[in-house]
Amino acid sequence: MEKTKLKIILLGDSGVGKTSLLKRYNDKDFKQLHNSTIYVDLVTKEICIAERQVILQIWDTAGQERFKSLPSRFYRDTDCCVLVYDVNTLKTFESIDNWHDEFIKQANPETPTKFPFVLMGNKTDVNNGKPRVVAKEIADQWCGSKGNIVYFETSAKAKINVEEAFLEIAKKALTNE
Ligand code: GDP
Ligand code: MG
């Protein structure tokens, strides 16, 4: 059976948990990470969806504030772009617009409003007794304003929704193929 390759990229500010989410999805134990990803890193994973064998090529990026430094050839031919922020840090949510626009600019998809993005609000396990910084409704609103972006609230640490989110990401990627 022929296998379909799907290219997925993770974008978002440094520290939001991109590498941790990918490690969690890749069955590795969650570790308190200290090193930021250097440039980009690739994880491949084979799964079966809709009776098809697909190979997910998931690219992890080291965002920092230098998001413009990734060359546009890196963004091209992406099948699904995952935007990650930390629900406890407003700045990382505010950056999502930049990451979204940067992706559109660099990847230059045929119909930007139809391109499959998935938004992930990570670190939902954090409970410091204060109200959440970015409410779910705010993230939902943002998704609606951009067309039809799917939103997942996740915790790489507490294993919440990670598997579910990546399954949806794979399905979305398949629609773009
Ligand atoms: P990246 O820069 O986006 O790749 O972020 P990392 O995966 O390196 O994570 C940054 C920090 O946040 C690390 O100290 C992680 O241990 C921590 N972290 C990642 N995901 C979670 C989560 O779901 N909950 C909590 N509490 N901490 C997390
Ligand atoms: Mg990282």
Image: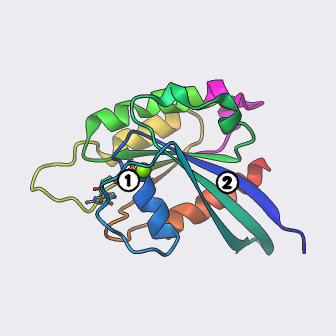
Image position of 102 (left or right of 45) = left
The residue located at (35%, 52%) in the rendering is 35
The residue located at (44%, 40%) in the rendering is 12
Q: Is residue 153 visible?
A: no
Mark nearest the camera among 2 and 1 is 1
Q: Which mark is residue 67?
A: none
- The quarter of the rendered structure image containing the N terminus is bottom right
Q: Is residue 10 visible?
A: yes
Q: Ligand 1 sits in which quadrant?
A: bottom left
- Where does the image place residue 44, in percent across and percent down from the top left? 65, 64
Q: Is residue 35 above or below residue 71?
A: below
* Residue 170 shown in magenta: no
Image position of 172 (left or right of 150) = right
Q: Which residue is mark 2?
A: 172
Of marks 2 and 1, which one's residue comes earlier in the chain? 1
* Residue 116 shown in magenta: yes
Image position of 29 (left or right of 47) = left
Chain part drawn in magenta: 104-117
The residue located at (11%, 50%) in the rendering is 130
- Where does the image place residue 88, in percent across and percent down from the top left? 24, 46
Q: Which mark is residue 17?
A: 1
**Amino acid at pointer 1:** Gly
Please tell me in which quadrant of the rendered image residue 70 appears: top right
Q: CA distance from mark 2 to mark 1?
A: 21 Å
Ligand 1 within 8 Å, label 1 CB: yes
**Amino acid at pointer 2:** Lys
- Where does the image place residue 45, in percent across and percent down from the top left? 65, 68
Q: Is residue 151 above or below residue 1?
A: above
Q: Secondary structure at mark 2?
A: helix
